[in-house]
Image: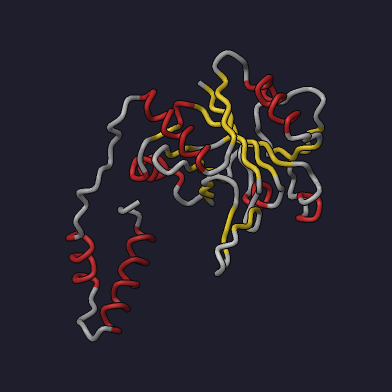
Amino acid sequence: MATDPVTNSARTEVLRRIRAAKGGIATAETANAEWSAIDRTYRRQATRSREAILELLIDRLQDYDARVLESIHVNVRTAAAGMLKDRKANRMVIPAGLPAEWLPDGVQFVVDEHLPAMELDHVDGVMTAATLAIAETGTVLLQNVPGQGRRAATLVPDYHLCIVRAEDVVETVPEAFARLHPTARLATTFVSGPSATADIEMTRIKGVHGPRFLDVILVR
């Protein structure tokens, strides 16, 4: 993303304005020189084994109150059927392009074709795939692509069932951004557990900015 001309020009302008506000000499050359001089010695590659990375993701997701099921000995359809039954979810919205073989019988699946927010609010949940997952932060990344759909469909329903492939799990945030580079212009949602926030009195409330409940099926 650092070589993208739009990103570079926007960054240069931001740095120029900051420097001008501080009374410095604001030029594109000085802005780019300072940007290039930033120390980037942080870790960019995985250091754990593949199994340890997956275990870390599971641990972080569970710490955020998400339920995780590994589909090792069962297929995704069977795993999803169990998750949806536990959640009493009978009517689910799905994005176009979600693999049909993942969808269990006995559940009504409604394909999101720009459904209005009111209708999204009345389904039992949404079921999607994922682009990536970051183990260190327990984060699932969704993009507006087939199988994942638009942002509204994953933020309005109260429950989200997300399918994550093991090969799409990375350990660090820099690894994730490197892999996102080819699709950097797509709308991307970072989901770290169910939606939760706290007010000034530290009262924790779920569901303000997205689903209150998150289930993840990790496909080995």
Task: Determine the residue positioned at 73% across, 41% down.
Answer: 125
Residue depicted at 28% across the width and 42% down the height = 44
On screen, residue 31 above or below 171: below
In x, y percent, where is residue 64?
Answer: 53, 44
Task: From the viewer's perspective, tell me whether residue 178 is left or right of residue 41.
Answer: right
Residue nearest the viewer, comparing 14 with 135: 135
Q: Quadrant of residue 27?
A: bottom left
Residue at figure coordinates x 73%, y 50% from the top left:
114
Residue closer to the observer: 8 or 128? 128
Relative image position of residue 164 (x, y in whole percent):
54, 31
Place of residue 137 in the rendered image (x, y in percent of width and height, measured from the top left): 42, 44
Instruction: Name the residue at the bottom extreme.
Output: 23
User: Residue 214, percent across and down?
Assistant: 62, 41
Please tell me which residue lies in front, 118 or 187: 118
**Based on the displayed image, in which of its 4 quarters is residue 100 positioned?**
top right
Residue at screen point 23% across, 86% down: 23
Q: Quadrant of residue 45?
A: top left
Q: Nearer the viewer, residue 154 or 99?
A: 154
For residue 82, above or below residue 22: above
For residue 147, above or below residue 74: below
Left or right, 177 with reference to 201: left
| Position of residue 189 in the picture relative to residue 110 (left or right) | left
